[in-house]
Image (tube, coloured by chain):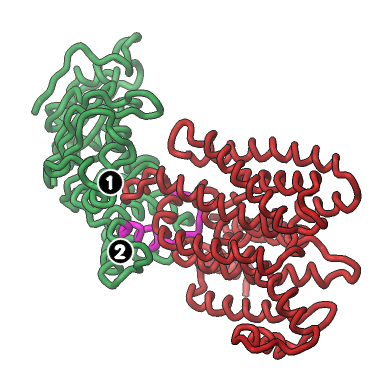
Amino acid sequence: MPSILVRRRSKDAAAEARSLPAGRSAVVLGAALLAVLTAAVAWGSTSIPPGEVWGVVWRRLSGEAPRPGTDDLIVWQLRLPRALSAALVGAGLGVVGTAVQALVRNPLADPYLLGISNGASLGAVAAIVLGLGAGGGLGLGLSGAAFAGALATFALVWAVARRGGGFAPLRLVLAGVAIGQFLSGFTSYLVLQAGDEQQTHSVLFWLMGSLIGANWQLLAVPAVAVPAALLWLQARARGLNALLMGDETAAGLGIDVTRLRRELFTVTSVVTGVLVAVSGAIAFVALMVPHVCRLAVGGDHRRLLPVSALFGAVLLVTVDIVCRTAMDTQELPVGVVTSLLGAPALLYLLDRRLGSGS
Amino acid sequence: MRIDIEDLHVAYAGRTVVAGAHLVAAEGEITGLVGPNGSGKSTLLRAVYRHLRPTAGRVLLAGTDLRELSPVRSARHVAALPQERGSDFELSVREVVAMGRTPYKRAFAGEDAADRDIVSRALADVGMDAHAGRRFTALSGGERQRVLLARAFAQDPDVLVLDEPTNHLDIRHQVDLLALLRSQRRTTLVSLHDLNAAASVCDRLHVLHAGAVVASGPPRDVLTPELMAEVFGVRAVVVDHPLTGDALIAFDHRAPASPQAPVSGSRPATVRCVR
C-alpha cells in the first residue's frame, strides 16, 4: 500500500476525538490499580505471596488476631500504608493537575506552577535544617511544617492574584511563578546551611519527592482530602468544561466565573499542600496524567476527572515499586523516576499531537 | 422575548466604556449593533450575557431586570456567542455543543434522551451533524464558528446574543451564517463590523458611538452619508443594492471624511434618534 495513504489515514484518526469509552477505561484502570497495589505489597527485599498479602489484609479488616510472624508487620505496618499513600498521592496529583489546567486554561500547567509546592518545600526544609523533623524521617512535624508553608504561600498568591479582580489566569500564573521563585531562593539558602550529610540527604529526598515516610497516621488526611476534592470537582465538571472555552462563554452559560475560579484555586491549593506534605514535591505526574487521560477519553471533565484519579494512582504505585526495588543498596526518590520517565513520555505525546496537524 | 436596555453604564478594565446606552431588541427581530472600534459594542453585549455587571442602568429581559434572575436562570433564556474561540483540550464537536445544556443540568446529572436530541438538532441546524465526533480544534475557522453557534442553539434560548459572528469568516461562510440567523427567526442581538451585512440582515440597527446609542431605526433610515462621516469618519454614499434592493453603502477608500475627523472619543454634535 502506498505509504502516503497510510499516513493520510492516521492523520484523519488524530482529527477524530478520543477513541476509548470512559466506562471501560475506568474498569481497566480499577483492575490495574488492584493489581499494582497487590504487587507493591508483595514485592520487596522479602517477597510475600499475593494470597498471603490479601490474607493479612482480610484478617486485619475482619478483626481476627494477626498471625505471629513478620508477614503481618511487613504487609500491614510497612508496605500497605506506603502503597496506599502512593495511590492517594497519585490520584490527588492527577485530579488537581486536571483542575489547575482548567483553572488557568492551559494544558501545560500543573499545581506547582502556582507556587504552593515551593512554599511547602520551604516549610519542610526549614523544619529539617532547624531540627524539627526529629530522626531525619519524614515525620508528622515535617508534614505539618510543609502544610503550613503551603497555606502561607496560598494566602500570599491569593493576595497578589485577586488584585485587578477575577483571578485572571495569566495573573494567577505570574503571581504563582514569581512567589514560588522567591521562596525557592530561601530554600536554596537553607540547604546550604544544612548542618550535616544526614540533613542534606533528608532535604534532597524531600525536594525530589518520596513515599519513604508513609504510615497510617500520615495517610489519614489525604484519604479524606483526595476523595472529597474529586467529588467536589465532579459536581462542577460542567463548569470546568465551560472554563476551557473562555470566561465569557462560561458566563453566558450561567456560571459565576470569578467565584468558580476562587473556589478552584482554594481547593487545588489545599489539596496540593496536603499531597506535598505527605510525599514532597513529586515532579511531572500532575502535568502528565491529565494529558495522557485526555488523549484516551477526551476533554470532558465528567469523564476526565475520575479517569485521571485512577491513572494517577496506578502510575505512582508503579513508580514507587521501581523506586523501592531498582537499587539494592538504597531507595530512589520518586521525583527522579517520574522525571526520567515523564519528560520523554510528554515529549512523545506532544510530538504526536503537533504532528497530527491540529 | 424582548430585551430593553435602559441608561446602561458598563465599565471594562476600570474604564466606563458604555455610558448611558438605550436600545430595544424586539421579539423575533434581528437587531444589529454597529459602531467604530472601541465604541462599546462588545462591552454592551457582555452586560446582556452577564459577563460584566452594569455600573448603572438596567438590562430588562421581557420586562424583568437581569439582576433579579440568577445567572443560571437568565442563561436559560439568553445564549451568547462571544468572540472567544476556545483552547486545545481535546473536546469533541458534540461535547462543545452539549455545553449548551449546562444551565439546565444539576451537579452530577448526565445528558438524557431529550438533551441528546436537542444537541443533535442544533448540530443539524448548522450543518455539522456529520462532524460530531471530530476534535473541535481540528476544525477550520468557519466550521468552528458554526459549532459554537450550535452550542448557543443547544441552550434553547429565547434571545441570541452574537458578538461579531462573521469575524474571520470568508464571504461564503458569512453569507451562510447570516442566512442561518435569518431563518431561525429568534430574537437576536448581533454586533457587526460589516455595515452592508448589517443593512441586509438586520430588521433594526443601533449605532453605538463613544458608549451611547446615537441613532436607531431601520437600516435605510440609520445608515446615511452624514452618519458615516460623523460616527465612522468616512465618506460614503448609500445606493440601492442591484440584486437585493437593500441599502448598499459604497465607501470612499482613498480618503477619510475630513483629515482631523474624530474617529472615536467625543460624541458627534448632531445626534438623531429614530424610534
The residue shown at (59%, 62%) is A221
The residue shown at (85%, 53%) is A201
> Is A166 on the left-hand or right-hand side of B62?
right
Quadrant hosting residue B29: top left
Which region shows up in magenta?
Answer: B85-102
The residue shown at (34%, 9%) is B260
Subunit bearing disc 2:
B
Residue B33 screen position, x and y as percent: 23, 33
Quadrant hosting residue B162: top left
Q: CA distance from mark 1 to mark 2?
A: 23 Å
Q: Secondary structure at mark 1?
A: helix
Q: Which residue is mark 2?
A: B119
Between residue B20 and residue B253, name the one nearer to us.
Answer: B20
Q: Mark 1: which amino acid?
A: Val
The residue shown at (28%, 21%) is B210
Residue A38 screen position, x and y as percent: 69, 81
Nearer the viewer's eye, disc 1 or disc 2? 2
What colour is chain B? green
Label ID, residue B175: 1
Q: Mark 2: which amino acid?
A: Val
Q: Is residue A13 above or below residue B220?
A: below
Residue A350 screen position, x and y as percent: 63, 56
The chain displayed red equals A
